[in-house]
Image (cartoon, rainbow, N blue to C red):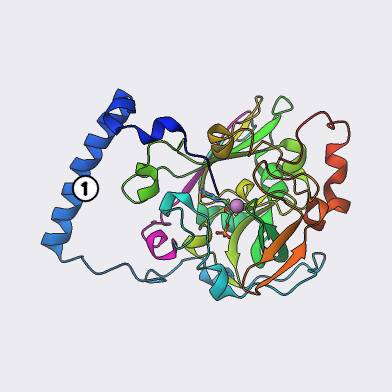
Amino acid sequence: MFIKRRKGWEIPESEVTPEPLVLNRRALLGAGAVAAGTIFAGGLAAPVRAGAEPDPSRALYPAKRNETFVLDRDVTPESVNTRFNNFYEFGSDKKIHTAAEALKIRPWTVKIDGLVEKPQEIAIDDLLKLMPLEERLYRHRCVEAWAMAVAWTGFPLRSLLDHVRPLGSAKYVRMETFLDRITAPGQRQFWYPWPYVEGLTIAEAANDLAFLVTGAYGKPLPKSMGAPLRLATPWKYGFKSIKSITRISFVEERPVSFWEKLQAKEYGFWANVNPEVPHPRWSQASEEVIGTGSRRPTQIYNGYGELVAHLYVGLEHERLYV
Ligand SMILES: Nc1nc2c(c(=O)[nH]1)N[C@H]1C(S)=C(S)[C@@H](COP(=O)(O)O)O[C@H]1N2
Ligand SMILES: [Mo]
């Protein structure tokens, strides 16, 4: 994601940092010192190895493929996909896969709250047992004009709605990523509005394409790709596909997402893919297919219009494509 630096960010930190953030940073320095002490005393200095911890959900994969979703291109090789990631909690340079290994994904609970009949806190492994896992081949289009194709495993967000039953007064689903400044160095960058937040309308969430992802390439999801639970909304720009979800709330007010808070003119709520509506700073007419060295023309709704275009009838006055 490219964001324009605000002038204020360039003046010395002491002059711009509000007091609560100064306090947090002091607390952090303290915690850092404790962590360093632990490493020294316990000899834990070895880097965390990928896949070092056994994943308790391993046996659920691979899941049966749902053949409804077909691709117009090859699936992006796993080795490309797990090493080129946007996950700002761990850095902004795409090479976050090693840093992301620090994320602890067990125990992991998802809090479901707000305007819903059955609010609950559910452990990820209990959720996995309840939901109908399947594999789907989806395209993914980042707002930065690159694209990939992935074999996701997961379940329709709709299945979760059916399980927890949002009330009629709920208009939006708001989703939130973990907040852990010790594990995620990006979250110490106070100018970002952590935690990462995204949202959908209830109608979007209930659409068959909206998919909660728990695996990729026939295995549990790698941490770099948002384990243990991330969203895939392939007709929208990739920043809507929030990673490492810890909370799902049903709300009346439209949530303001992470990127929208930073730069509303460039990253809006709807963010539907449209080759004819440029980003304020670049064209969206074509996309680089990562791992291939080639570009392709971008498609309206990223090629999924047949399934989702009806969701936007009557909303033409909204900024549907930014
Ligand atoms: N929590 C969180 N979720 C996130 C992001 C992020 O920085 N933090 N980046 C988004 C963006 S911009 C994209 S393109 C996709 C990237 O997913 P991938 O790394 O699996 O390709 O994740 C999205 N979800
Ligand atoms: Mo993105």
User: Could you tell me which secondary element the residue under label 1 belongs to?
Assistant: helix
Q: Is residue 164 above or below residue 60?
A: above
Q: Is residue 316 above or below residue 222?
A: above
Between 3 and 256, the one lying in front of the other is: 3
Q: Residues within 10 Å of mark 1 (few under 14, many from 20)?
A: few
Q: Is residue 205 magenta?
A: no
Q: Position of residue 95 (x, y in %)?
A: 45, 63
Decide if residue 248 is in sight here.
no
Q: Is mark 1 within 8 Å of ligand 1?
A: no
Q: Is residue 97 magenta?
A: yes
Q: How many marks?
A: 1
Which residue is denoted by mark 1 in the rendering? 32
Indicate the quadrant containing the C terminus: top left, top right, bottom left or bottom right.
top right
Residue drawn at x 21%, y 42% is 29
Q: Position of residue 201 (x, y in %)?
A: 72, 36
Q: Which residues are magenta?
A: 96-115
The kind of residue on which mark 1 rests is Gly
Apparent side of residue 267 relative to residue 298 in the rendered image (left or right): left
Residue drawn at x 15%, y 66% is 43
Residue drawn at x 75%, y 49% is 273
Residue drawn at x 77%, y 67% is 66
Q: Position of residue 63 (x, y in %)?
A: 66, 70
Between 280 and 266, the one lying in front of the other is: 280
Q: Is residue 284 above or below residue 219?
A: above
Q: Position of residue 5 (x, y in %)?
A: 47, 38
Between 260 and 107, the one lying in front of the other is: 260
Determine which quarter of the picture holds residue 77.
Answer: bottom right
Apparent side of residue 305 relative to residue 39 in the rendered image (left or right): right
Decide if residue 68 is in sight here.
yes
Between 285 and 203, the one lying in front of the other is: 285
